[in-house]
């Protein structure tokens, strides 16, 4: 008989189990799981449980809490539960804002530091690199402007893909021929990010719930889109406050439009725009 176990519907989860998983996910990665996401949780856990040979939700719960093997399993599970949808130059108005900001940076001796928070599979940080290289003024004769991009995410598999810098040509259809030719090289249907560009992007695993433990600081631009929406409102503000602390004076914070409301940080000024949610850090 054909092995069709992967098509079986997931086992019904008790209210108590749902509550336990919901609390664990919110506490560890900030993920909110309303009742409407219960089937999603059951299905995702069910698939992973079959892969590792666990029959009961409780048994699997103990498994992910169990020492080193639990830490490894947790990494895989988080990757399965998080949404990693992304694309190059996803939000054109925010990209334009970053472009204008970088273009106005006149000190060519200084390296501009950019941070893509929740970078998924890398399309966002590579887009920011392209914008940076096309916008930051550079001494004539230099091929590349002085900048670095730090890209962080909680999903290690997403970061591995990002770090490889290889994308199917379909993912690049919206890029101009000029950008494609300048920053990618073709191998069959795959497009490889150009090496010099790639070397400017550094990928690091980071949970945004643990920002205070991270030494990352002094960024000129922090770009955080389509991540805060997964968190509760109070947590979104808490994370945004911590990101603001990691900006240099005069630095730019770009969030996703509508992702944060009623946030009036003391040291930042909102950039007036209906399409973008962005702030400048005051210099004093
Ligand atoms: C929808 S993607 C957004 C990707 C990109 N920023 C964009 O706008 O196209 C959300 C990303 O946030 C990451 N993520 C979710 N929870 C996280 C957390 N607690 N810490 C860091 N990254 C997280 C996910 O792994 C995923 O890659």
Image (cartoon, rainbow, N blue to C red):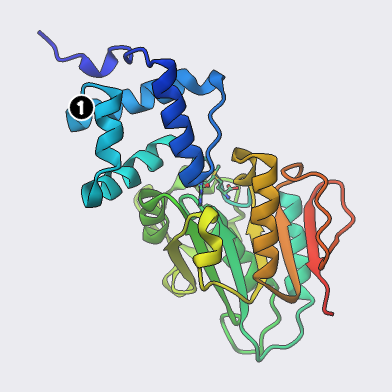
Percent from the top left, x then y, of residue 143?
56, 82
Q: Is residue 142 above or below residue 30?
A: below
Residue at the disc numbered 1: 54
Kindly identify the residue that appears in the image at 53 percent across and 49 percent down.
172
Left of 75 or right of it: where is 35?
Answer: right
Percent from the top left, x then y, of residue 184?
47, 62
Q: Residues within 10 Å of mark 1 (few under 14, many from 20)?
A: some
Kindly identify the residue that appears in the image at 27 percent across and 49 percent down.
72
For the view shown, which residue lies furthest in the top direction?
Answer: 1
Task: Specify the quadrant of the image occupied by residue 247.
Answer: bottom right
Nearer to me, 266 or 134: 266
Percent from the top left, x then y, of residue 103?
76, 74
Let me know if residue 82 appears in the view.
Answer: no
Nearer to me, 276 or 123: 276
Task: Specify the quadrant of the image occupied by residue 147.
Answer: bottom right
Q: Is residue 183 above or below residue 54?
A: below
Q: Label 1's element?
A: loop
């Amino acid at each position: 008989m054909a092995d069709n176990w992967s098509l079986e519907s997931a086992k019904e989860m008790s209210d108590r189990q749902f509550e336990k998983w919901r609390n664990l996910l919110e506490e560890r990665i900030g993920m909110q799981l309303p009742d409407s996401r219960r089937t999603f949780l059951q299905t995702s856990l069910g698939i992973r449980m079959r892969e590792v040979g666990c029959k009961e939700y409780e048994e699997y719960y103990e498994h992910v809490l169990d020492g080193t093997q639990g830490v490894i399993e947790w990494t895989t599970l988080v990757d399965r539960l998080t949404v990693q949808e992304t694309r190059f130059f996803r939000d054109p108005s925010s990209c334009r804002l970053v472009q204008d900001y970088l273009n106005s940076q006149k000190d060519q001796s200084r390296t501009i530091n950019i941070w893509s928070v929740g970078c998924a599979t890398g399309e966002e940080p590579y887009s920011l690199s392209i914008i940076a290289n096309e916008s930051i003024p550079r001494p004539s004769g230099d091929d590349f402007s002085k900048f670095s991009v730090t890209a962080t995410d909680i999903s290690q598999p997403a970061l591995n893909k990002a770090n490889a810098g290889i994308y199917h040509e379909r993912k690049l259809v919206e890029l101009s021929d000029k950008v494609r030719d300048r920053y990618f090289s073709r191998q069959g249907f795959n497009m490889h990010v150009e090496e010099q560009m790639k070397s400017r992007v550094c990928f690091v695993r980071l949970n945004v719930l643990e920002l205070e433990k991270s030494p990352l600081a002094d960024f000129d631009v922090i770009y955080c889109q389509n991540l805060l929406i997964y968190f509760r409102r109070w947590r979104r503000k808490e994370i945004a406050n911590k990101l603001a602390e990691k900006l240099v004076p005069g630095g730019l914070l770009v969030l996703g439009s509508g992702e944060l409301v009623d946030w009036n940080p003391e040291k930042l000024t909102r950039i007036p725009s209906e399409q973008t949610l962005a702030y400048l850090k005051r210099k004093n």
